[in-house]
Amino acid sequence: MSGRFITFEGIDGAGKSTHIETLADWLRERGHGVVVTREPGGTPLAEQLRELVLHAPMDALCEALLVFAARRDHLQNVIEPALARGDTVLCDRFTDATFAYQGGGRGFDTAVLARLEQWVQQGRQPDLTLWFDLAPATAAARRGAARAPDRFEAQDEAFFDRVRAGYAARAAGDPGRFARLQAAAEPAAVWQQVQAAVEARPWW
């Protein structure tokens, strides 16, 4: 039995992390095995690569190569085994983030990203992507109150405008997979959107 793969996407500060554990608990209460993970990261190797991507100066191609290297290890050692067991995998970011941040934010060639996506993922895509859509100015205010910024969080609002547009392009290209959530709402209202998007799928 194959499990289900649900990804959480959005610009930094959109509230993804607030709801991923809530959904995990909700699914476990209904008898589902759940694995919660993140990208870049999720394995010892991928977590090391994450630190480089978030903190070491590099260009967009280097970022993309490191992110996809981390993704390959993550897929092989965490995501695919969990799905093969029949678990539901909840992942904080996946390839849509690469197209949004490196493709949209950095302006890197999305045709190259698409080729890397094909090589690394071999057709694996999420079953559902929850896109926490939020205006960059609102997200910036949330981030400033929460933590010191990394290389990406320190970018200006125009960068995050491009990232948001990158997510919109991915959603337009695969509308059946995406659920666009209004992340500016109060947490309880956002959770209702998450729950509705999951319950709308015919899997459960």
Image (spheres, grey):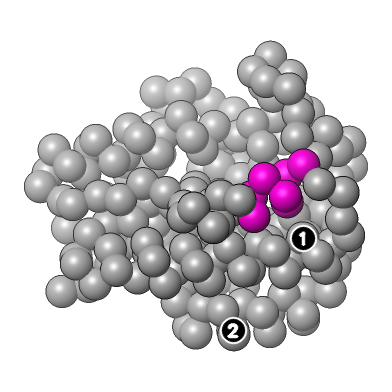
Cα gap from disc 2 to disc 1, whole angstroms? 17 Å
**Could you tell me how many numbered marks the image carries?**
2
The residue shown at (49%, 84%) is 122
- Quarter where residue 203 is shown: bottom left
**Residue 132: % across, % down:** 55, 42
Kindly identify which residue carries mark 1.
63
51 in the magenta segment: yes
Q: Is residue 22 left or right of residue 46?
A: left
Q: Which residues are magenta?
A: 49-55
Which amino acid, mark 2?
Gln
**Residue 191: % across, % down:** 38, 32
Label 2 or label 1, whichever lies nearer to me, is 1
Q: Is residue 200 left or right of residue 110?
A: left
| Crowd tier of the residue under label 2, counting other residues whose Cα lies within 10 Å: few below 14, some 14–19, many 20 or above | few
- Quarter where residue 158 is shown: top right
Kindly identify which residue carries mark 2.
118
**Residue 4: % across, % down:** 29, 63
The residue shown at (56%, 50%) is 47
Q: Nearer the viewer, residue 9 or 169?
A: 9
